[in-house]
Image: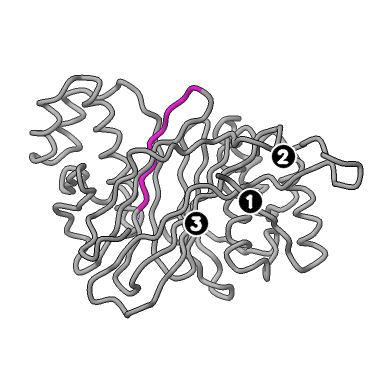
């Protein structure tokens, strides 16, 4: 069951921004006294993950995963108003409409997620986001240092945000595109042995699952494609990292889920560093459709796998 997410910031500017957000779901009011628009994001699937070995007893963190259809954000010019002058300048210099819309949607959802994570003490427009030495977006040092990760797969944009935990996220479209060359190039020998024994359709799906896990993992450790993907290995049955040198002594927890947008199937993976905290409350936020009811992005509560927990809970 889903419940409406009421985004009510405290400042007048925040109130104005929420009014903009509500333009995404123009639902008909159930009575004359109710507003003609409803909040555009709703709470979806939720899960507690952990417990991490050697973590501080009782300590817990929160991770939110925000999902939105790219077009649902990019088609509304009002959202440009919450972006910085530098972001707008960079967007206007992108010649590809698809890439421009992708970047716009990512920044809008990111700014919304950041403000929600701090209880709207900072409005979405107020965040100062700057590129680091590698060109990756980072929050200015003078502001609260939240962890976040962004990914795109047409037509979906996803953002993970956490105040206390390092995160990495990736989403990919499921297509029958895996080949023997791709498998041999990007998978370690133990993964190759599994993929080469299955049916072609199953291999394609499992290859996408492995790819999203590797992307999420390398984003979390901050090295991206600086790590050869064939040096990272996963067990898909338990979502266990078999080997990955950059992990060092970290306790990294992985979650996966299938995501649908229209008739398109995507696979999403998120990596959460649970080295310091006992557990994390994982919450999925999805954008409401034009009728304000079912969401435009759907996360089926199936095939959601996690690393086995020695205490028997997840």
Please, which colouring scheme is shown? Answer: one colour
Residue bearing the label numbered 2:
24
Q: Nearer the viewer, residue 281 or 2?
A: 2
Q: Are marks 1 and 2 in contact (CB under 8 Å)?
A: no
Q: Is residue 134 left or right of residue 314?
A: right
Going from the N terminus, do you reach mark 1 or mark 2 first? Answer: 2
- Name the main secondary structure of what is drawn in magenta: strand
Assess disc 2: are there few (<14), some (14-19) or many (≥20) residues with their C-alpha within 10 Å of its C-alpha.
many
For the residue labelled by badge 2, is the local secondary structure a helix, a strand or a loop? helix
Q: Quadrant of residue 60?
A: bottom left
Give the x, y percent position of residue 107: 59, 49
> In the rendered view, would you say 267 is above or below 251?
above
Q: Is residue 215 magenta?
A: no
Question: Residue 87 got which mark?
Answer: 1
- Mark 1 vs mark 2: in front: 2
Which residues, given as a range, are shown in magenta? Answer: 263-270
Give the x, y percent position of residue 89: 66, 47
- Mark 3 vs mark 1: in front: 3
Residue bearing the label numbered 3:
64
Q: Is residue 238 left or right of residue 197?
A: right
Q: Quadrant of residue 237?
A: top left
Q: Is residue 264 magenta?
A: yes
Give the x, y percent position of residue 240: 20, 52
Query: What is the CA distance from the residue labelled 2 to the residue labelled 3?
Result: 20 Å
Q: Nearer the viewer, residue 210 or 59?
A: 59
Q: Quadrant of the N terminus?
A: top right
């Amino acid at each position: 069951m889903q419940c409406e997410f009421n985004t009510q910031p405290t400042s007048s500017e925040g109130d104005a921004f929420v009014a903009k957000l509500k333009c995404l779901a123009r639902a008909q009011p159930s009575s004359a006294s109710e507003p003609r628009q409803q909040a555009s994001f709703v709470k979806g699937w939720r899960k507690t993950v952990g417990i991490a070995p050697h973590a501080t007893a009782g300590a817990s963190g929160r991770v939110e995963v925000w999902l939105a259809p790219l077009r649902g954000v990019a088609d509304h010019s009002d959202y440009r108003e919450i972006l910085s002058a530098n972001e707008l300048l960079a967007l206007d210099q992108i010649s590809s409409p698809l890439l421009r819309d992708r970047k716009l949607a990512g920044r809008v959802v990111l700014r919304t997620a950041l403000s929600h994570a701090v209880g709207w003490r900072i409005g979405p427009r107020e965040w100062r986001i700057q590129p680091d030495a590698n060109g990756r977006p980072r929050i200015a040092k003078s502001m609260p240092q939240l962890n976040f990760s962004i990914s795109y797969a047409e037509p979906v944009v996803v953002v993970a945000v956490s105040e206390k935990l390092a995160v990495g996220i990736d989403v990919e479209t499921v297509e029958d595109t895996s080949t023997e060359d791709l498998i041999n190039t990007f998978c370690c020998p133990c993964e190759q042995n599994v993929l080469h024994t299955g049916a072609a359709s199953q291999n394609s799906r499992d290859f996408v699952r492995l790819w999203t896990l590797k992307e999420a993992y390398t984003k979390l450790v901050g090295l991206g494609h600086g790590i050869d993907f064939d040096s990272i290995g996963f067990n898909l049955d338990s979502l266990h990292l078999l080997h990955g040198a950059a992990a060092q002594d970290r306790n990294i927890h992985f979650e996966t889920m299938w995501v649908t947008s229209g008739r398109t199937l995507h696979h999403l993976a998120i990596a959460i560093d649970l080295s310091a905290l006992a557990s994390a409350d994982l919450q999925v936020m999805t954008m409401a459709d034009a009728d304000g009811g079912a969401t435009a992005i759907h996360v089926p509560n199936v095939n959601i796998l996690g690393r086995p927990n020695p205490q028997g809970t997840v």
